[in-house]
Image (cartoon, helix red, strand yellow):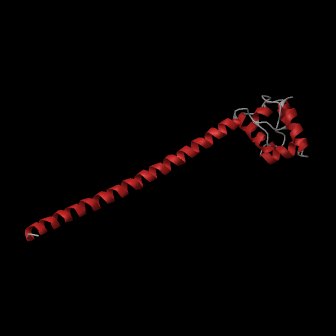
Amino acid sequence: MSLHEKVKELAKSKNNTLDVCSFDMGFSKNYLTGLKKHQATSDKIVIIADYFNVSADYLLGRIADKNSSCKHLDTIQTQEQTILNLEKSCDDYEKLIEKNKKDYDNLLNEYQKNKIDLNVYRKLVENMGI
């Protein structure tokens, strides 16, 4: 089945004419009808696929079932989500490291301050002969 025939069938399933669908997609009135004679560009195929809620692979004849997606699409989407989750985890980890570094610096400063005060106290105690 040609791209034109598939689009015509999809338009019919929406109870629309090709002209109405062309208008809805922002194409010229006769664009979809003209698919009998010319090929669609990739950007137009994506718009058509999104409009009819089918995959570009279906429109291009790479898969037969209009309700199927590209066999690797689910894997790609899962991998993209995993990458987003990892990026968020890295951001959270970097924030935690920065917070821990600040806490450590504060603790070290307090320790050094108290250590000096303790040494001063010890010297005072020694000078007092206690």
Residue 50's spot in the image, x, y percent? 76, 43
In this rendering, the answer to whether 108 lies above or below 1 is below
Q: Residue 21, can we see it?
A: yes
Q: Residue furthest front?
A: 130
Instruction: Determine the image quadrant of residue 18.
Output: top right
Q: Nearer the viewer, residue 121 or 87?
A: 121
Residue 43's spot in the image, x, y percent? 71, 37
Q: Nearer the viewer, residue 103 or 47?
A: 103
> What residue do we see at 86% from left, 34% from top?
6
Q: Is residue 87 left or right of residue 102?
A: right
> What residue do we see at 65% from left, 40% from top?
78
| Image quarter (top left, top right, bottom left or bottom right) of the N terminus | top right
Q: Is residue 85 left or right of residue 108?
A: right
Q: Residue 17, can we see it?
A: no
| Image quarter (top left, top right, bottom left or bottom right) of the C terminus | bottom left
> What residue do we see at 47% from left, 49% from top?
93
> What residue do we see at 45% from left, 53% from top?
95
